[in-house]
Image (cartoon, rainbow, N blue to C red):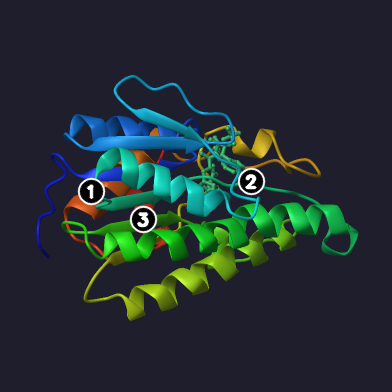
């Protein structure tokens, strides 16, 4: 495994104002990276350049990548930490919910990767860390559309990682339940009683370690040491 230098790296972070995104941005900044942050609402994080983009909308992922490259001068890294969740019985998922979830959690991120990878190929120690979820490995009852969306993105990312093995390190990041508040703001349904989740900062630190230490995959098991104390 080779060590990756983040000092002066140009990195785009989606979902940057979120529970996982924010500590990821803070860790990247602490390591000396230059960071463009994004969300539907432009996050305000000192020391970063913000771009508002709704990944569900056609053309928006591509515009976001172009604006990030224009600001950074090049793209060395992408951290995709945007996403939404939904709960409820599989057969009760209506069309609006399916559209919302698959646009935000699959189509948007796929368009984002499609736009970013050609730039990343020109980057230094290039990486794309894509947060999918543990449900991509173990689909959960009451979370069928979310599980299916994350599994779809995970499959795309895994295939992309194989295609780009020699050029861009594409990392499928599959954390277990984490205390970011995501479960409390679903786009449909309401969360069942969930066990205590992981500490977002510990999860972010584990992702950053994977980036800097040259790891190529972060299964749910890789977060075993990120338990809440
Ligand atoms: N928390 C967990 O238990 C857990 C476990 C495994 C995986 N994950 C995944 O980790 C990622 C981050 O989740 P989180 O827990 O940090 O949740 P979070 O705190 O709700 O953050 C989600 C972020 O995604 C952004 N976002 C949502 N829809 C978007 C859209 N259409 N376009 C652009 N940005 C959008 C939100 O910003 P705006 O509202 O400004 O758009 C927000 O910053 C998600 O993909 C989630 O599925 C979470």
In which quadrant of the rendered image does the C terminus lie? Answer: top left
| SS at mark 1 in the image | helix
Residue 84 shows which numbered tag?
Answer: 2
Q: Give the crowd class for mark 3: few <14, some 14-19, many >=20 residues within 10 Å.
A: many
Looking at the image, tell me whether mark 3 or mark 1 is earlier in sequence order: 3
Q: Is residue 48 above or below residue 142?
A: above
What residue is pinned by disc 1?
209
Are discs 3 and 1 less than 8 Å apart at CB?
Answer: no
Residue at point 22%, 62% (across, down)? 122
Residue at point 72%, 40% (across, down)? 186
Q: x%, y% of residue 94?
A: 88, 57
Can residue 148 be seen here? yes
Residue at point 33%, 47% (across, down)? 69
What residue is pinned by disc 3?
129
Q: Is residue 206 left or right of residue 177?
A: left
In which quadrant of the rendered image does the N terminus lie? Answer: bottom left
Q: x%, y% of residue 29?
A: 24, 31
Can residue 226 be seen here? no
Please state which of the two labelled residues, at mark 3 or mark 1, is closer to the viewer.
3
């Amino acid at each position: 495994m080779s060590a990756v230098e983040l000092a002066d790296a140009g990195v785009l972070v989606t979902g940057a104002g979120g529970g996982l995104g924010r500590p990821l941005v803070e860790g990247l900044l602490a390591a000396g990276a230059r960071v463009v942050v994004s969300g539907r609402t432009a996050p305000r994080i000192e020391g970063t350049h913000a771009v508002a983009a709704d990944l569900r909308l056609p053309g928006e992922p591509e515009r976001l990548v172009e604006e990030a490259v224009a600001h950074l001068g090049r793209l060395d890294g992408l951290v995709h930490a945007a996403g939404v969740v939904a709960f409820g019985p599989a057969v009760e998922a209506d069309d609006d919910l399916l559209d919302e979830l698959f646009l935000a959690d699959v189509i948007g991120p796929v368009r984002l990767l499609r736009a970013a990878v050609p730039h990343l190929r020109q980057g230094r120690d290039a990486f794309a860390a894509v947060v999918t979820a543990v449900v991509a490995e173990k689909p959960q009852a009451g979370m069928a559309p979310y599980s299916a969306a994350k599994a779809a993105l995970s499959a795309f990312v895994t295939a992309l990682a194989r295609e780009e093995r020699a050029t861009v390190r594409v990392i499928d990041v599959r954390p277990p339940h984490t205390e970011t508040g995501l479960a409390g703001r679903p786009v449909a349904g309401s969360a069942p009683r969930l066990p205590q989740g992981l500490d977002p900062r510990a999860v972010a630190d584990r992702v950053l370690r994977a980036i800097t230490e040259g790891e190529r995959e972060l299964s749910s098991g890789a977060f075993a040491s990120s338990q809440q104390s």
